Image (spheres, grey):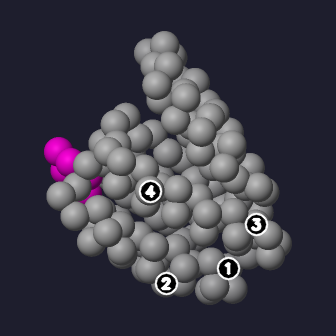
Amino acid sequence: MENLIIEKTEATPEIRFDYSSGILELRGESYPENTAEFYAPVFEWLRKFLNSGNELAVTVNMEIIYFNSSSSKALMNLFDLLDEAVSVGRKIAVNWMYAAGNESALEYGEEFKEDLNLLDFNLVEKSV
């Protein structure tokens, strides 16, 4: 299975999903004009990855500095998909990274975490 690499733009995050290591990274801002279209290949790759027979533990590192409401929904759908995978035995951890002093980023992370049942969702403060 090929890795998924999507380069960052002004309105979309950098996405690097590495099949062999199980490390999935999203970094940057997310306010694409068409959120569903932008995230469609991300969900397609993730579903294939989770059903590929690869039993590696998965680490998702997220450092989304800013996102709009439609991106928030896409991120929640992503977390729901990961939460569902955990319910059938996958070991997955999400690291929600936010800059020290960025209270809104921390609050967004807390809200996402609150809505999940099984997913290991870590709030990681980064020093500036």
**For numbered disc 4, what is the local secondary structure?**
helix
**For numbered disc 3, what is the local secondary structure?**
helix
Judge the density around disc 2: few (<14), some (14-19), many (≥20) Cα neighbours within 10 Å: few
Picture residue at 52% right of the left edge, 35% below the top:
108
Amino acid type at circle 4 is Lys
Between circles 2 and 4, the one closer to the viewer is: 4
**For numbered disc 1, what is the local secondary structure?**
loop
Picture residue at 22% right of the left edge, 55% below the top:
32
Asked if labels 4 and 2 touch by Cβ distance under 8 angstroms, the answer is: no
Q: Position of residue 105 (x, y in %)?
A: 47, 29
Q: Position of residue 40 (x, y in %)?
A: 36, 74
**For numbered disc 2, what is the local secondary structure?**
loop
Let me know if residue 4 is in the magenta part.
Answer: no
Picture residue at 54% right of the left edge, 27% below the top:
106
Q: For residue 83, what is the image quadrant? A: bottom right
Q: For residue 29, what is the image quadrant? A: top left
Let me know if residue 8 is in the magenta part.
Answer: yes
Q: CA distance from mark 3 to mark 2?
A: 21 Å
Q: Along the polypeptide, which appears first: circle 3 or circle 2?
A: 2
Q: Along the polypeptide, which appears first: circle 4 or circle 1?
A: 1
Q: Which residue is mark 3?
A: 86
Q: Is residue 42 left or right of residue 53?
A: left
Instruction: Look at the image and give the residue range highlighted in magenta.
Output: 7-12
- Picture disc at residue 54: 1
Asked if labels 1 and 4 touch by Cβ distance under 8 angstroms, the answer is: no
- By secondary structure, the bulk of the magenta-drawn segment is best described as loop
- Picture disc at residue 34: none
Asked if labels 2 and 1 touch by Cβ distance under 8 angstroms, the answer is: yes
Q: CA distance from mark 4 to mark 3?
A: 20 Å
Q: CA distance from mark 2 to mark 4?
A: 27 Å
Q: Which residue is mark 4?
A: 73
Q: Is residue 31 left or right of residue 119?
A: left
